[in-house]
Image (spheres, helix red, strand yellow):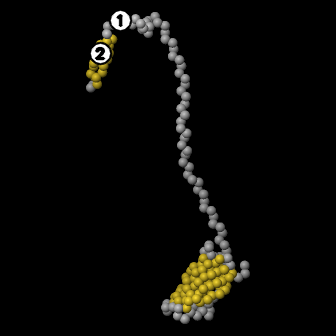
Amino acid sequence: MLRGVMVRVGGIVAFSLLLAAAPARAQNSDIFREDAPPAPAPAPRPAPRPRPYPPPEPEAVAPAVVPAPALPPSPSYDGTYTGEATVSTNSSGKCFFASLSKTLTVKNDQFTYAFSETDHTVVTGTVGRDGTVNSFAPSPGGGVHLSGKIQGSAFTGQAVSASSYGFSCVVDFRFQKMGR
């Protein structure tokens, strides 16, 4: 017969069961017999197999730094360009260019154009990689803005001369490169 005992330990109730004064041996069970044969040894357990882990995450690889391709060499615009210079706008009738230069000189991608030899107005600047020409030069009566482009062996452009006297002149250029 079993007798239950209830014990309160630090706020927790624990039950324990005690065997009552019962016979020490059960009649139908061999496990409590002193003369019972020993239990067979448990079979050895196989060694644990390693568990397959998920494949490692690929490490983040920084993108390769590829240098920018080198710019192709700038074409050489060096040379002397000569040709026709015509006055296309004469707002006051005072645009006379008897001494208008008809030569643009380029050396080491630097250009020089003597707009008016009378006024000593010389426009200088740099020829862009694409052949563009764009510069300004002051003159005694105002200033001159020169713009244009060299393509192949031709220079086409325009010079605008503004005067402090209130008039302006526009000169159009069509020059060809001399020699090679």
Residue 171 position, x and y percent, is 59, 87
Position of residue 43 in the picture relative to residue 106 (left or right):
left
Above or below residue 55? Residue 92 is below
Position of residue 1 in the picture relative to residue 136 (left or right):
left
Residue 56 position, x and y percent, is 54, 41
- What amino acid type is highlighted by mark number 1? Pro
Q: Which mark is residue 170?
A: none
Query: Where does label 1 land, which residue?
Result: 23
Mark positioned earlier in the residue sequence (2 or 1): 2
Residue 89 position, x and y percent, is 56, 89
Q: Residue at x 52, y 88 (%)?
A: 162
Query: Where does label 2 land, which residue?
Result: 4
Mark 1 is surrounded, within 10 Å at the Cα level, by few (under 14), some (14 to 19) or many (20 or more) other residues, namely few
Marks 2/1 in contact by CB < 8 Å: the verdict is: no
Q: Which residue is drawn at 57% across and 79% down?
A: 134
Q: Which residue is drawn at 59% across and 54% down?
A: 64
Q: What element carries label 2?
A: strand
Q: Quadrant of residue 177?
A: bottom right
- Compute the Cα span from label 2 to label 1: 18 Å
Which residue reaches farthest front?
28
Position of residue 29 in the picture relative to residue 120 (left or right):
left
- What amino acid type is highlighted by mark number 2? Gly
Q: What element carries label 1?
A: loop
Position of the C terminus by quadrant: bottom right
Q: Which residue is drawn at 53% across and 36% down?
A: 53
